[in-house]
Image: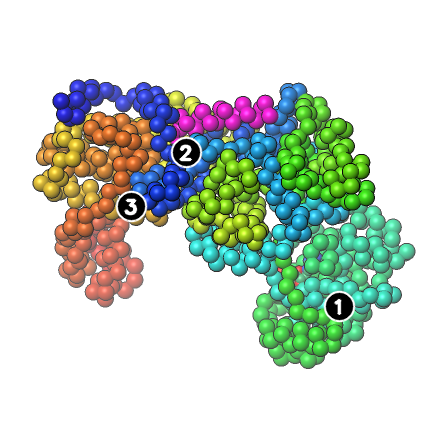
Amino acid sequence: MGPNQARRTVAVSEYDPQALQAKWLQRWEEQEPFRASEEPADPRERRYMLDMFPYPSGDLHMGHGEVFAIGDVVARYWMQKGYNVLHPIGWDSFGLPAENAAIKRNAHPAEWTYANIETQAHSFKRYGISFDWSRRLHTSDPDYYRWNQWLFNRFFERGLAYRKGGLVNWCPNDQTVLANEQVVAGKCERCGADVIRRELTQWYFKITDYAQRLLDDMDQLTGWPERLLTMQRNWIGRSEGADVLFTIEGREEPVHVYTTRPDTLFGATFFVVAADAALADEIVTDEWREAFEAYRTEVARLSDIERLATDKEKTGVFLGRYAINPVNGERIPVWAADYVLSDYGHGAIMAVPAHDQRDLDFALKFDLPVKVVVHTGLADPGETGEATPGEGTLVNSGPLDGLEKAEAIRKIIEVLEAEGKGTGAINFRLRDWLLSRQRYWGTPIPIIHCPDCGEVPVPDEQLPVTLPDLRGEALAPKGVSPLASAADWVNVECPKCGGRAQRDTDTMDTFVDSSWYFLRYCSPGYTDGPFDVEQVRKWGPIDQYVGGIEHAVLHLLYSRFFTKVLHDMGMLDFSEPFQRMLNQGQVINAGKAMSKTLGNGVDLGQQIDDFGVDAVRLTMVFAGPPEDDIDWADVSPLASQKFLARALRVMSEVTSEPGVAVEGGDVELRKVTHRTIDEVTRQIDSYKFNVAVARMMELTSAARRAIDVGPGPADPAVREAAETLAIMLSLVAPYTAEEGWERLGRTGPVAFGGWPSADPALLVQESVTCVVQVAGKVRDRLEVSPDITEQELRELALASEKVSAYLTGMPRKVIVRAPKLVNIVP
Ligand code: ANZ
Ligand code: ZN
C-alpha cells in the first residue's frame, strides 16, 4: 500500500487546533527537531537567531506572543533554507519583582521565580516556538551567576570595575540605587516613585573608556534600524569644543569650563556652578551661604532629567563672587544653579545668554546682561527671549570679528592654546555604569573588604559566592543591602592575609546578567569559563536579534560594551554582538496600552484556548509590519483560524503521489506558485512578514480554485502549490503546516522540508496594454502586468510624460479601470 492510499483513509476532519496541538507537540517533544547541531562535520552554514530572553514575571503575555512569533518566522525560515540554526531560550531570572513577591508571601524569591519559569516554559512549548531546549539557562542559577562574578574579577583586574563615592539616584520606595538609564522623567522605572539624590559609595563599570569605540563601531551596525542608532548616539552624546580656564577672584587655582561654543567667549556675561558641586560650596561668600545651602537642599531632590528640562522655571543663587573672562578680562558674576550638572563636563559653565536658551532664560529671570557676539540676522535675543544658537558672523569679539562660527571656533582654540588659557576638548554625555544594588535577588559582588588589604576579589576557584538563604521579612528594603544582615555570610577571612574581613553586601545590576547571556548559549554547560571560546567562534556574532525598543540604550549598549571588553581580553573574535536588529511594536487594545488599571488586558492563554496557537501566531504576524503596534481590537484571530482551516483542507485534498513529476502540471497554477515563492522570499528577507502571509493566502485561494474548477486535485501543480504552502506556513502556523505535510504524504518535520526556489521561467508575466486617455483622447499606451493594482496604475499613468504634456495641474478626476484603461479628466 503506497503512502497515498494510506493517506486517503485519513478523514478530513473539521479544523480542530487543540487536537493538532496535542498530536504534534508530543512528537516535537520526543524528536527535539530544533536542536542546533554541533557536529563538526555538519556542512551547513550556521546562523544564530536570538530573541531577548524573558523576565519570569508570570505567564507569557500578548507582548511575548508577538515578539516570539516574529522571531520564529526568521528562525524557521533559516531552517527551511538549510542553515544549521541556533535558536536558544533562557530566563533573565534575577530582579526586584521576585523579591517583592517574596516579602509579601514570606517566601524565598527562588520559589516565585522558578515556578513562573516553569509556567512560561510550558507555554512556550505549546506556542510551538522552534527553540533548542537543550541550551536553556536561568541567570539566577549559581552556575550562571558564577560567571558574572568571574567576569567582574576580570573587569576589576583591568581597572574597569571600581568603587567611588558620589551622588546617586535613589529610589526611596525600592530602597536602592538606580542607574541614570533607570530613571524615567524623574521617576523610578520600576515603581514610579520620585527619585531622589543620595551620597553613596558604589561600584561602577568604566564604560566611558569605551565611549569612542561604542560610537565608531556603529558603522558596522548596518543591520540596525536608524532610530536605534540615533538613540545610542544621543545617549553616548559626544560633543567637540574647548576646555577654557577662568580665574575666580580670591581663588588661586583657575577653574575649567567645558563649552561647545568657544567662539562665543566674548559673549559670556555670567558664570554658573552646579549647586551640588564642591566648587560652589567652596567659593560661596559668608553673606550668601545661608541662601545657597537652602537652595542646595532643594536641588538635591531633583533628578538630572528634571534639572535639564528646558521648560523648567530657572532657579539659582548668587555666590557673591566674580570670575574673570580669560579673553577680555571682564568681571562676571558667579551663580549656582540646578541646570548645570555637577558630573558633566567640569560642573561649571560660562553662560552666553544671547546664544544659549537656558542661559537666556536664566539671564532674563535674574536681570543679567545679554550680549550678542554672533550676528545671525535674527532679532535681538534680549528683546525676543529667543536665543540665537545658529550660524552667523562674529561681532564684538576682538580678533574673531568677521569670522564665521566654524572658523571662529578654530581660531579661538588656537589663541587659547597659545596663551595657556584653554585647549580643544571632546566630551561625552555617557556616564560610568553604576552597578551596585542594595537588594537581595541578584549576583553578589565577589569582593572582600579587608582593613589591611583593601578590596580583595574572591579568588576564581572559590566562585560562585552564592546567596545566603534569606526569605520574607529579611528581604524588606532598609536602605542597606539585606545581605548585610547575614552575619555568617558577611564575616570571612581575607583571601590575601587571612585576617578578619567582610564581604561586599551589594548585588549586581541585573543588566550584567543580560550583557553576555547570548555567549553562554553557545556552550551552556561549560565549566571552564563563561563560555567555550571555540563554540562562540563558530556561532557568533548573533545574526538576528529581536526585541523591544525599550532596550535601545540599556541592554544593547551594555552588551556592546561587554563584547568589546571580551574582545580585548582575546576571548571573542568579533567586537559587535548583534548584526541585525529588529524591534517589534507593542500589542495594544482599542488604541491603548494594555494595563491592569484600564482592565483592557487580553490574555494570551485565553486567546490560544479560543482560537488555537496557529491562529494567534498568524494574527500577530499578519497584523502589520513587525515594527508597528498591533491593536488587538482591529484584528481577527477567528478570520485567521478560518484561513488555516481552508489551507489545511487544500493540503488534505491533494490526490497525487508525493514526488510526482511536476513538469506536466497546470502552468497557470505553477506560475502563481512560483511568483509566490519569489515574492515571499524577498518579503521575508526584508521583514515584511505580513505581506508574505497575504501571499500565502492568495496561493491558498489559487490552489482551491484549481481543485474545484480545474485542473483538479490530481494535477501535479496542485501538489506543488500545496507543498509550497505547507513549507511557507510552517513559519507562522507550525501545527497546521505539520498536519498538512503529513496529509500530503510527506514524512519528517515540515520545518526542514526545504525552502523552494522560484523557477525564473515561470516568473515571466505576459503584459496587457493599458490605454490612457486625457479628456477622452488617447495620449499614451502602457504595457502593464495583468494584476496591477488601481493605485499603481494610476501613478504610472500620471507619471507618463506623454500624459503630463496635456495636464496643467492636478487633474480633476482620474478614473482607473485596471488593467486596461485610465481616463483622466483635466
Ligand atoms: C557656552 C555656550 C554657548 C554653550 C552657547 C552652548 C551654546 P553638549 O553638547 O551637551 O556637550 N554645559 C557644559 N557643562 C555643563 C554642565 N555641567 N551642565 C549643564 N550644561 C553644561 O553641551 C555642551 C554645552 O552645555 C556647553 O557649551 C555648555 O554651554 C553646557 F551659545 O558653553 B555651552
Ligand atoms: Zn587582608
List x then y, in percent, for residue 145.
59, 36
Residue 40 seen in render: yes
> Which of labels 1 and 2 is toward the front?
2
* Residue type, mark 1 in image: Leu
Q: Secondary structure at mark 3?
A: helix
Residue 15 placement: quadrant = top left
Q: CA distance from mark 2 to mark 3?
A: 22 Å
Residue 479 seen in render: no
**Residue 681, numbered circle:** 3
Residue with the mark numbered 2: 131
* Residue type, mark 2 in image: Phe
In the rendered view, would you say 565 is above or below 484?
below
Between 37 and 513, the one lying in front of the other is: 37
In the rendered view, would you say 799 is above or below 150?
below
* Horizontal side, residue 281 vs residue 421: left or right: right
Between 252 and 273, the one lying in front of the other is: 252
> Which of labels 1 and 3 is toward the front?
3
- Which class describes the residues within 10 Å of circle 2: few (<14), some (14-19), or many (20+)? many
**Residue 245, numbered circle:** 1
Q: CA distance from mark 1 to mark 3?
A: 61 Å
Q: Which residues are magenta?
A: 110-129
- Sequence-first tag of 2 and 3: 2
Between 223 and 152, the one lying in front of the other is: 152
